[in-house]
Image (cartoon, helix red, strand yellow):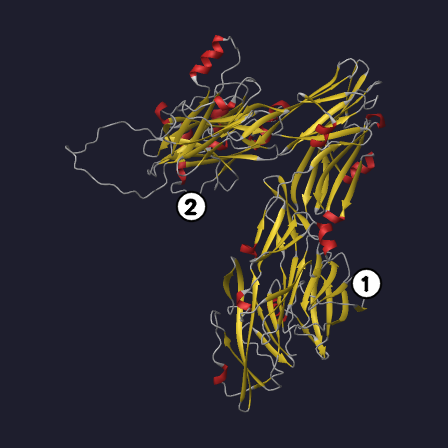
Amino acid sequence: MGGFIGFGWFVLLIAVVIVAAQKKLSRNIGTQCLGNVMRVDIGPLGGKILEVAAVMNNATVFLTPSMASQCGLSVTVCQFGNARIYASLQNCFAQTVDYTAFTTTLKLHLHGNQMGEDELYQVSETCLYTTWASRDIICERNYMEVSMKRAAPDDYVLPKHPAKGANSRFGDPRQDAEKRPVEAGSGMNTLIITTRAPRLLLRSPKTSPETYTQIVAGVPMTVVKTSTLFEKKWLATEIDAAAACPILEGSVFFTAYSISWFLPRHIDPLISSGHYQLLEVHMGVDGQKLDAAEMAARQYSLTVSDMHIIVEIPIGAVGGYFKSHVQDGQYLTSYTIEPMIEMLWTEDSTHGDTRYKVLLPITTPLLSRPPQVIDNTIPEERVFKVLFGPFSSDVALINITFPSEVLSEADCKVRGINVLEQMYPESSSKVLTVEVPFTDQVVLQMTEMGITVYILDITLGLVVLPELAPFTHTAYLEAKLVENVPPSISGACDYQNFYVLVKYGTHGFNFQTTVGKQILTPSLAQQYSFMENGTHFSFAVPFSSPDVVFESVQSSTIRSRLDVVLKNPETSKTIKEFSMSCNNISPLTECFPNGTMTAWAVKLESVPSLNPSQLTLKDPTCGPVFSDDHYAYFVFTANSCGTTRKFLPNMMLYENEISLPDELERKKQDSKNEEPEFELKVSCYYDINKTHAVAFHARPRRSQPYAENAKGELQVEIRLASDDSYSAFHRVEDYPVAKYLLQSLYFEVELMRSTNSKLSVELENCWATLDEDRTSQPRWNLIINGCANPVDPYQLILHPVWRDDRVQYPSHFKRFEVSMFAFSEDKETLSRQVYVHCDVVICDARNPQGGVCTGPCSNQENKLKGQRRAVPHKDSVKHVSSGPINLS
């Protein structure tokens, strides 16, 4: 077998056994022979660069990436820096005996890390493989390979052009006067075609120009086909070789909890006879086949249908790993796994059997699985114990922030604050536990009537490695020490459930629990996933449970509440009451491009006697298409059921209302029912600047059109950008917008619909309030007389505006950034909404009015001294506001 490959990067190794190490360094390198593929596990690279050279006939050849794909070698490096290599048994460097034993020898050089010594190894391994099929096909990350049994004797071989459909650059090799012996490989372009009795080998990089894409049973596949002509004297034999491999996009689909991979059962480009029979199908991970028991333990699923072979893998299952990401300050993860499918089929006696193997690395889209905070504090031990997680194992703790100070992990150890890390290798995740003694100075204490309350406010500063992307995770805990500790209740929410934790207190589990309006019976406890461990119990209540009440609704959220009451079963006296309210993100209104509108009406706690089935739209004949005791669902169009419309800048607003008919309202009033009226507004915004093609017929008018003289007014808008690129902005329906303490707010003010380059907008004054009323108090001054607030100028940054595809006149724009700390006078402010207002002056270079029109921060000294300045004409001052913005 001829040919070689090599590259000088860290992504290539072959199945190995360590023979020598020059510096006597120990590295746990493992190897496995996996059928017609070998796998090598190098272990963590530790930041070093791996250079690999192949040893062949006493010659050393350094390897390159392009040759790797031509010679049957590939690599993966996981988030922990562990390198794993795969190689075809017929790779270009393998020495074979009787086509049953394959040996490869490599030299490895690990270097580049200043913290450690270079590592040098020479490694070699032999894999046995005797179960060759008439045709063996391998689909790897960077190449595809087909090995075929040869019926022809040792003779001369001429590779022909690839079969029809390939993007070929081959000429007709039969026009070449020189014939090549069968032991030589023809590496024309990017294809490798080699022959050695008794096999013919074709290998192609997946990106080769000779490949093309074909849809097979709805699955896109990369295909390469060639024909090879064997000639000896007057005898000529032609052998067709083909490989087809699935493409990730189009064959893999994701849900929130699973991965589904579809592979055609009948791969048309590889089957040329009418008789076809599938003999075997196996599944594996990382090139290793799994038996039925292993697949069941990992909850993998392999299904064979008439059209497809389907693999389903739960996200987070053993065999894959999670990778952490930070986006807009939020912690996200992705999951990566490398499944394998191996098939064996047979055709007629002429074509024989085919063994087909695919190794496909799969990574999910970003997953939102926020880490939790669990309070494991036992007050009698006088130590706060709080658990954070789970995090992926690539997350590192940098520091811990308390209200009074910031401590590193080393500082915490000196102070007696324990930071514990617990790993879960099977899910590549970990949790962090922080233990803070009640006596530490960061713990606040309040004592009243013999009860001491200990308070811990803690924020973990974390980063994702190796990107060093920062994010935080916060907890607020209280612990009480009393002689007679009563039961306590705490809870949390995610996007589906309320989670309730009840601690027994001094006297143990001797109380009756009521959830909503029902007693927590054994059957109800089973329904709510009740768990008990001797000191406390927990359960989970879905948002849709009848024990949950709805407090309020907004355009995209429902605020729900769960009430839990603990009572003395003998006296019926209340021991503990607990209520927890959470926002469930659930759009109540959907607006479709064809004008269809849908809306959910929710029965609120404030109207307990409401029957949702009696609700109607403005037109009382338009009732719900579905209703039950909690909901009513409406479907209508923009021109029906009393829907009205309004024209707004850049958009059109369609509105309707859901309420009880007038007759039912009158009956309520006659019965002196003092319940509030139920009324829910339904709104849809449509962009009126979109262009649609329409057809119409013109009629002659009786008179000529005319225009009236009118006075126009320049329009100014303020908008909130997603980030400092000012390329994406929050829409009207996005408000209130949620922002966090570590984030900044990016505002843009624009003079709309003006093409006068002589005009400019200037920010005279900008400020923030807690109320929509721009004159309300308290007030935070951001810009005063065109300049950042001189009391604290570092909270605001004015950004320059440059011309681009969206900005034609930079003078028509003003941009500024406000730090969230600008509104952090006290903790109460941080949990409230703010509105930002600006007085905007429109300046004309042809008729300057003084003041802010004379330039940025002009006459700054006079402004600070309170001297008079020129006042712009009142018609040139515009008032704009943005909000509300929720500060968290």
Work out whether residue 856 or residue 180 is closer to the camera in this orientation and state it: 180
Secondary structure state at the residue bearing disc 2: loop
Q: Amino acid at mark 2?
A: Asp
With respect to residue 463, does 141 lie above or below?
Answer: below
Q: Pick out the residue farthest to the bottom.
A: 233
Residue ID for mark 2? 804
Work out whether residue 607 or residue 179 is closer to the camera in this orientation and state it: 607
Q: Is residue 86 left or right of residue 410?
A: left
Residue ID for mark 1? 25
Q: Amino acid at mark 1?
A: Leu
In which quadrant will I find the N terminus?
bottom right
Check contact, mark 2 vs mark 1: CB within 8 A: no
Q: Position of residue 794 (x, y in %)?
A: 57, 33
Task: Report the residue at 51% width, 57% height from top.
Answer: 218
Task: Report the residue at 57% width, 18% height from top.
Answer: 608
Residue 404 in sight from this viewpoint: no
Work out whether residue 270 or residue 814 is closer to the camera in this orientation and state it: 270
Q: Position of residue 9 (x, y in %)?
A: 66, 64
Residue 416 in sight from this viewpoint: yes
Task: Report the residue at 52% width, 33% height from top.
Answer: 587
Q: Is residue 720 left or right of residue 345?
A: left
Work out whether residue 888 or residue 607 is closer to the camera in this orientation and state it: 607
Q: Position of residue 621 (x, y in %)?
A: 40, 24
